[in-house]
Amino acid sequence: MRAWIALVAVLLAGCANDRHVEYETLAPDTFPVLTATGIAPLSSQLGSNDEEKMRRAMRAAKLDAYRELAEQVYGQHIQGQSNVNEMVLRDDSFRAQVDGVIRGARVVRAYPVGDSYVTEMELDFATVWALYQQQPRQRIKKVTYY
């Protein structure tokens, strides 16, 4: 029995090689471009004059476009709840939440339409990939055993 354990220990010790792994960065084959549109009402914005209402609507429309981009990249978290009492639906509610970081998006167009302000944005994943080169996607290029 001891001889068997010694043989296994020797064989396993021979498998413990030191090695050096070298990686290379790979770019994806294609980069998608996502688009989003944000809309905000002008007249219902808080403000003492039309210029301030316009500025607030511009900001709200841009944030709405960012929210839509985050939905496309990360998805939405949906929570739902229904309450039934005596086989009668008493309450039915749901909540949606978006959480994420969008980097590299750019405003394509921003313009007023009637009583609304519209902002069109795009997110080119070639730009996102370039921004994240500090944390590249990698594959094993070469392994050197010592």
Image: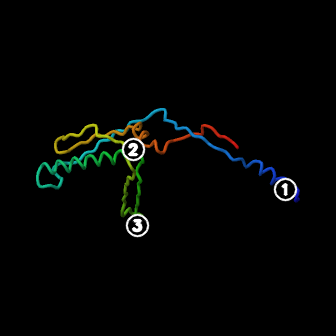
- Of residue 78 and residue 14, the one placed in the foreground of this image is 14
How far apart, in angstroms, are the residues tagged by discs 3 and 1? 70 Å
The residue carrying mark 3 is 85
- In the structure shown, which secondary structural element does the residue marked by tag 2 occupy? helix
Sequence-first tag of 2 and 1? 1
Q: Tag count in the figure?
A: 3
- Of residue 131 and residue 112, the one placed in the foreground of this image is 131
Q: Can you say which quadrant of the picture contains the C terminus? A: top right
Sequence-first tag of 3 and 2? 2
Mark 3, other Cα within 10 Å: few <14 / some 14–19 / many ≥20: few
| Disc number placed over residue 6 in the picture, else none | 1
| Disc number placed over residue 72 in the picture, else none | 2
- Of residue 70 and residue 113, the one placed in the foreground of this image is 70
Quarter of the view holding residue 6: bottom right
Of the two numbered discs 3 and 2 in the rendering, the one whose residue sits closer to the viewer: 2
Q: Can you say which quadrant of the picture contains the N terminus? A: bottom right
- Of residue 145 and residue 42, the one placed in the foreground of this image is 145
**Which residue is at a point 25% across and 37% down the rendered structure image?**
109
How far apart, in angstroms, are the residues tagged by discs 3 and 2? 37 Å
- In the structure shown, which secondary structural element does the residue marked by tag 1 occupy? helix
**Which residue is at a point 49% across and 35% down the rendered structure image?**
27
Question: Image height check: is 93 above or below 131?
Answer: below
